[in-house]
Structure formats: C-alpha cells, structure tokens
Image (tube, coloured by chain):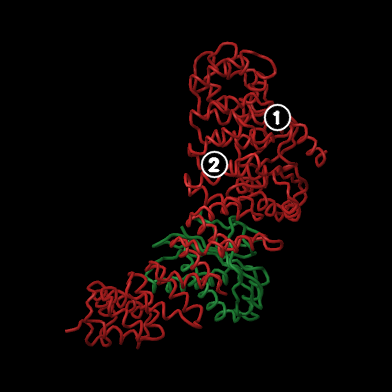
Amino acid sequence: MSMLTGFRDKSFLDKISILNEVATAKDPAELEALLDLFQNPLDDTSVDYMVVTALNGVLSSDEQKAVELLDKEEGKLRTLCIRVCGEFQFKSAVPALLKMAEGDVDPDFLFEVLTSLSKIGGPEALGLFRSNINNDDDLIVVMSIEMLGELKDEESIPALKAFVERNNEDGNYGVCDLTTWKAVECLASIGSDDALDFVVANLHHRNPTVRRVVTDSLTVLAVKAVPYLTKVISPETDKDDMILAANVLGFIGEKEGLDVLMDAIEKKFSTDSSVKYAIYEAIGRIGTMKGVISLIDGLDDDDELITVAVMTGLDGLVNPGVTKKLVEIVGQGGSKAGKILRAIVTAKAVNIFQSLYAEEKIGRFLMNAVVASKDSEVHEAFRAKLTEIGGEAADADIARLPEAVEIGGKKALAVDDSKSMLALYRSILTNAGYEPTVGENGQDAYAHIQLGEKFDVIITDMNMPVMDGMEFVSKLRQTEGYADIPVIMVTTESEYSQQELARKTGVNDFITKPFTADQLKAKIAEYVS
Amino acid sequence: MNVELAKPFIKAAVDVLSMMAMISPKPGKPYVKKSKTAVGDVTGLVGITGDMNGTISISFTKNCAVTIVKNMLGDDIQDILQDVQDAVGEITNMVSGQARAGLAEQGLIFSGATPSVIMGDNHTITHIATTPIMAIPFTSEAGEFTIEFCFE
C-alpha cells in the first residue's frame, strides 16, 4: 500500500515525516500520488515544499518516467522535470530538451532548458548553444558561452572575439561586460593558437577590468600560456605589451618563461628602462638559479630603478655564489658599488643584507647606507633582521639606527603592486621630505583614506590587482575631504584614451615610467608647495 | 560563478519590488566589477551559505530608496533614515528568501543570514568571495538600483 494513502487527512507532523520517507525511499510506486499532490497543492508552504523535494527524489530514480513527463506535461511540472533531468544528468532527455528549445520560446523557459542541457553535458547541444550566443537575453548568452568553452568549440572563436572587441570600442569600454569576461575565459578554455593569441593581444584592452580578467585567465593557464606570451616578448613588440606580457610570465612563475626573458635582456629587445624593469622583476618572481645570472648581469645597468628591481628579485635567491659575486662587485668600489648598496637598502633586501653583513668592510658600508636612509620603515626592516642575526656587533648596530624620524610633517601616499616600485617611492619621498605611506593596491590604499588619514599628495599606479588605480581615484574623489588632493598617476601606457578616462576620474597629472627621482620630485612640486 | 544562480535572484527582486513597492524594474546589461564600491547610496547585503557560499547585495540610489519607502508606507513616514533602512533590509530579506526557494527547486540548498543595511554615498560593500562580482543594473520609474552577486 502506498505510504501516501489518505495523506491529505493526516496531521502536519505526519505529513512531513511521510514525505521525508518518500524522498529517501525514492520508490517509483509513489509517483502518481505525489504528482497529484504537486498539481493540487495543499496550500501549506512547508508541506508543498516537501512535496517538491519528494517528487525530485522519486523522479531521480526513474529516468524513463522523468523523460516521459517532459513530453507530456506543461507548466510547473514540466519545469520540475527539466530540472530533474539536468540535476541527475539524464542523457535520454537530450532529444526532448533540444526539441523544446526550438522555435520562438519564452526566454525564461529557454534558460531552464539550456541550464538542464549544460548540466547533462555532451556535444549534442552544441548547435543550440552556438545559435544562442547572440540571444537578446544576456544570461542566456553567458550560459551558452560557458558551454561553448566547456565543449572547446573552435567554430565559435570569431563570435567570442566579437564580444571582447565590441567592449573595446569608443564609448563601450567604460565597464567590463559580463559577456566579455565569459568570452575571455571561454577562449582561454578553447586553447587553440588563434584563441590564445587573441587573449594575449588583449592584455592591452582599454578597460582595466578586462585587462585583469585577461591576466587572470592567462595566469590560470600557466605553462600552457607561456608560448603565447613569449611571442610578445620580441624586438618588434610595442613596449607596453612587452611589459604586460613580462608581468604575466612573472605571475605564472614557471621556468619555461625564463629563457625568453633572459634572451630579451641579452639581445636588448628594448632599451626602455621600464621594459627592462618589468623583465627583471619577472625573472626575480620566477626565481630559479638560472635567472640569477641574468639578475646579476642587470647590476651593470646604470638605472637605479633597475638595480632596485634586481635586488628585490635576488633577495629571495641568496646563495654563496650570489654573495661572492656581490662582494666582488661592491669590493671594486666606485659609483656602481654605492648604487648597489643604496638599492639593497631601498629594496629592503634583508637576506642580501644578512649575507653581506659578515663581510667586514662591505658590511660596514652597507650598515652606513641603512643608517643614512631617512625612511623609518627601512630602519624597522633592518632592525628586525639585526635582532635576528644577534650578537654584540648587531646590538651595537641596532643602537645606531635612529628611532622613528620626525619629518617635515608633509605626507604622501604611494600605491603600486610592485614591491620594488614601492621601495623606490619610499626612498624618493622620504628624500624629498615626505612621510611616505604605501599601499599594494587601490583597496589597500583606500583603507588609509577610510581611516581619515590626510595626505598632501597621492601617487598611484594604473594597473593593479584587486582594485586598480582608476577605481581607487574614483572612490577617493567621492570621499568627503579628498576631492582636491593632488593625484599623480604613474603609467606606462601612453595612449590618449586611457589618460582621458583617468582625467575624467579625477587624476590631476601623469608621469610616465621610467622617471628619475628628480622628475618625480619636480612633478610633485608642481602641486604641493 | 554560475549564471543559473543569478537568475532566481533577478526574478525574486522583480517580483518583490513590483509587489511591495509597486514599481516595475527592467534589468539592464550585466557587467563585471572588481571594486568594492557600491553603485548606490543604500545597500542591503546578505550572506548565503550552503551548496556554495556567497553574498548578494542590492544597492539603491537615494531617490529610488525613498520612492520605494513612500510606496510601501504611504505618507506615514516617521523617520526617513530609519524607514529606509528598515525597508531595504526587509526587501533584501524577501528577495533572498524567495530566491533561495527558487534555488531549492533546482536542488540547491542555501541558508541566508540576516541582511545588513549600509548607507552612505559610495560606501564599500565587502563581498566575501574573491571571484569577480557580477552586477546587474535595473531601471525603474522610481530610479535605479543594482544587484550584485559573488559566489565562490
């Protein structure tokens, strides 16, 4: 006898426990009675809710019946069957589902059918997903794009490219469309040469969020993305593209990316110091012993910024060979030695410091450079290291470090995702008499604003993870009391359109990487007297 | 992030607002954002846990929120700030509840926390997940509002 006989006359608690049992037992014999309860509800939300659950359970154990009902039924029961077929991946439902999606169907209903088909999976529905890639309903489009990616459908590549390109046109690049995000992920998932070349080419998309999506997708692809990124590292490439590709190779951190980066340095693909900076930084991030050779060679570069990038990279790779080499170069004295010692201090390369500390003369010089710094955070970092080293000499050196230095009272906020750039800003700003505060991204920086900290000037990078420069500035400008504070944006992207967008957001001025300490100081002086 | 999760919330928002506040919202083009700034002045935020974890928020412009409150309470407004806060919290709660019921029909079980309401121009919304945030802008005769989703 059916458990559901006389159900409607039972007490509430009995109803619930019976339905619970039916849902677990999944006995097809209960189906008829359940269907009746579903079609003629009891008007008690909790019980009706349980009926749905029980029906779901029973249908899940009876594929044939569930598919049969798809054809016969209409309205809410059909929707329930569509969902059950998807949830339990009933392959035999595919023909019926495909048929339902034909012709002029209501978008909400079509969405149900597509969702179900996407859960069942398999190539049968490929044509249907292709044909809905330009549907008027964006959610249907996105669902279709996701499936085309899963099915790795190369035929859809042109249509997918079109989403990203449309989002890059004048007047369309203000926000990152949901479809663009999904199209980029889909292209990355398809993974053909054509698709990945296109994704890499969009490292330079005009919308910052799209650029983030592209960077993230490539980073997720890891080794697979390396060959496509390396193509961009060539003498013919635009310098901005080369920088962005080098950044991603660094994020991926696989040794496969190293050769091309080392080549780029050796064969002088670019003489631009911001390109070299990005490459050294990436080599440092990849962090193999092979990369160390390139980094050491980078010490020959006259640019102080590059020396800082090299030191940041080397700091994680210290070994006796590196120490020996540094001792040798610094031992020769001259302006190069001074530059290297300053860079160790600026980059807060405490591991290198430790390895050189025991070297009599050089250790002394390095310590003097630390003491000479005006930056209290530098002192803090080296004080911690000296404490760790311990011993009499170290204690004596700790005593030499000044306690928190009071500077003029002017404050600056610098925002950049590159550790070495931040180190450089700290150094330049303290030198110019500012008390520096730094943030690794817009959100990090905005936390200081939320605490109500006041600054005389803000210097920010444009492309950063989590919250980019543009978003940071727009938030800043909308915060009470920060409408007029001068903001200088540091950019490698010379295009007019980006600067236009940034100016509208509230950036006062730009400085293009590479710049010297004096250029930055001069730029700040234009705004702060 | 699955779009199929978003759909029930959109439907619930339209249903709840047209029923409670007598407005007819029209969804616009969805977009992706990475920042945490709200796109409105009053936000109802609710955390969802279960088969997946995430947060949903509904941000109203000032005008939109006030119009909705007037439609809901008539002219009997005591303290506009308090009433707006209550109403937005209540709407968020209803949307979350109705959407979760819709998701349960798809076999996805979620429980929702009590919504919190944040007010202030361009305030920050902290979605718990780190994945990109999907935003759907709506227009209505009362003004604009935006629903944001973030699922891990």
**Of residues A229 and A367, which is closer to you in this image?**
A229
Do badges 2 and 1 share one subunit? yes
Q: Earlier in the sequence, mark 2 or mark 1?
A: 2
- Binning the other alpha carbons within 10 Å of mark 2 as few (below 14), some (14 to 19) or many (20 upward) gives many
Please, which chain is the residue tagged with disc 1 on? A
| Amino acid type, mark 1 | Glu
As drawn, the chain in red is: A
In the rendered view, does A383 fall on the left or right side of B67?
A: left
**Of residues A212 and A95, which is closer to you in this image?**
A95
In the picture, the quarter occupied by the C terminus of chain A is top right
The mark found on residue A93 in the picture is none
Q: Secondary structure at mark 2?
A: helix
Residue assigned mark 2: A249
Residue A46, x across and y down, in percent: 36, 78
Dividing the picture into quadrants, the one containing residue A171 is bottom right
Residue assigned mark 1: A406
Tell me the distance, in whole angstroms, between the alpha carbons under discs 2 and 1: 41 Å
Q: Give the residue drawn at x 38%, y 67%.
A: A121
As drawn, the chain in green is: B
Q: Give the residue drawn at x 73%, y 46%.
A: A494
Q: Secondary structure at mark 1?
A: loop
Residue A78, x across and y down, in percent: 38, 82
As drawn, A278 above or below A350: below
